[in-house]
Image: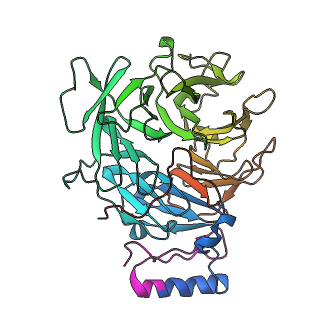
Amino acid sequence: GQPGGWGRASPVGGPALARVSGRGFLALVAAALVLSAAWGGADAQDIVLEDSDKYAWVYAVGDNGAVLRSTNAGETWRVQDQADTGTRQNLMDVFFFDARSGYAVGENGAVIVTQNAGLSWDGVELLDDEGAATPKVNLTSVHLQRFPGPAYLVGHGGLFARSDGGEAWEMLAVWCRGSACASAPYGDAAPPAEGYARVGRLQSVRFKDTSNGLIVGDDGTVLLTKDGGGEAPTFERIQVFDEASRPWPNITHIDMDDLGYMVIVGDRGVVFKVRHSKNEANDKLDFDFKGCNLEEGCKAAVPAPVRTTAGGCSVGESHLSAANTLPMSDDGKDLIMVAGTQGFAARLDESADAAKWALLAVPVVHPLERITSLYASTANTQVLVTDRGNIYRTQDGSAEAPTFVRVAVPEGFRFHRVVGRNAADESPAGALRPGGWGWGLS
């Protein structure tokens, strides 16, 4: 059978709000009867995968192992609770390689994986190359390049974990001395060399390819590696804030467009754009960091002061944890959206003649509501999720003043991340050609 598989809730935001969860044949029959009655014999959410190029598949994850799944760009949602996902841990991040294949990670080493567009989920135990269980670390972010294939996790205690196929994981910790950083086995208490200090919580990871990756975390941590696939990966700690801005803000999230250009966001409204170019001298990539502010777009040199005026790297006072970037041209100009506390959201179209940040009005229910994540299916269709369990959606996102509508979902959820895939898209940046099934399942 399929653990956590076919006991599914009926769609929300549509005519039925009844929830069905369970396992096995009887649960499947019960679900079919409920959905048949609600939808006149057809479940609009369970379209066949071969027709999914007409849809955007969106997934939101949150507390207590909850996953909400949509196959129509966030218009309606299906709730999957811990009986369906197989975990009661809080899920902090989710990543899909394509419309079928992805996994979510969370606290206490929780990892769940799907190969059928989220219809069912299986637990993954993180094992080392000798088959032994790895430490139960709180995981905050995941990035996948192939399914299965190169995969990366980050988390608390400076964790950087990597796997070449999902069956064996190398659990490392990052230690730094100044700008030079090295990796060592996660369980080692002693530094790899004199003067090195272990970094704290790492919040987000993205790899453009198997060598070049970016990791961000608390206290202004920005780690760049150009040998992330090597035997003993090294990192350079990039100082993006000036000394006058101490204590440096936490950096919370990275988003990467389909060309491999990245946007990173964090507390105190900080935003940076990261571009790359090929170094002809050594055939490697050079990375260029620019601070974003309300006056200049994303053009400020780093290290930058935390301010919204020219030369700064902030677009507001809100703490940001959400970012999404869509390529508008092949030269690195993107449509960037960021969001955070108190319902703050802003947008920058770098392809515009005078690119300036525009503040967006999101009608959050609670004045202190934090937008924790956002996904833009297209420039017009965008989905935002919050720490109060609300989902907001717009279909006129490119308008000067887009209209965000609250989508009806059951109460009691707290969302940490939302992602999506248009099945007709090419594989995302940093992704290799998809492979077969090979994850070690618990």
The quadrant of the picture occupied by the C terminus is bottom left
Above/below status of 357 relative to 195: below
Residue 254 is a magenta residue: no
Given residues 37 and 380, the one toward you in this image is 380
Q: Which secondary structure class fits the magenta region best?
A: loop
**Image quadrant occupied by the N terminus:** bottom left
Which residues, given as a range, are shown in magenta?
Answer: 1-28
Give percent across and percent down for residue 293: 66, 24
Is residue 183 rendered to the left or right of residue 36?
A: left
Write the residue at 75% across / 28% down. 356
Left or right, 347 with reference to 209: right
Position above or below: 157 against 68: above
Horizontal side of residue 387 vs 151, given as left or right: right
Is residue 14 in the magenta section? yes
- Residue 222 position, x and y percent, is 45, 28
Residue 352 found in image quarter: top right
Q: Nearer the viewer, residue 255 or 404?
A: 255
Residue 410 visible: no
Where does residue 314 sit, x and y in percent of width and height?
A: 61, 25
Q: Nearer the viewer, residue 417 or 365?
A: 417
Instruction: Please tell me whether residue 57 is drawn above or below residue 379 in the rendered image.
Output: below
What scheme was used to colour the molecule?
Answer: rainbow
Farthest-out residue, top = 244
Q: Is residue 164 visible?
A: yes
Q: Residue at x 34, y 39 (%)?
A: 160
Question: Residue at 60% across / 75% down in the picture?
Answer: 48
Q: Position of residue 129 (x, y in %)?
A: 23, 51
How many discs appear? 0
Q: Quadrant of residue 268?
A: top right
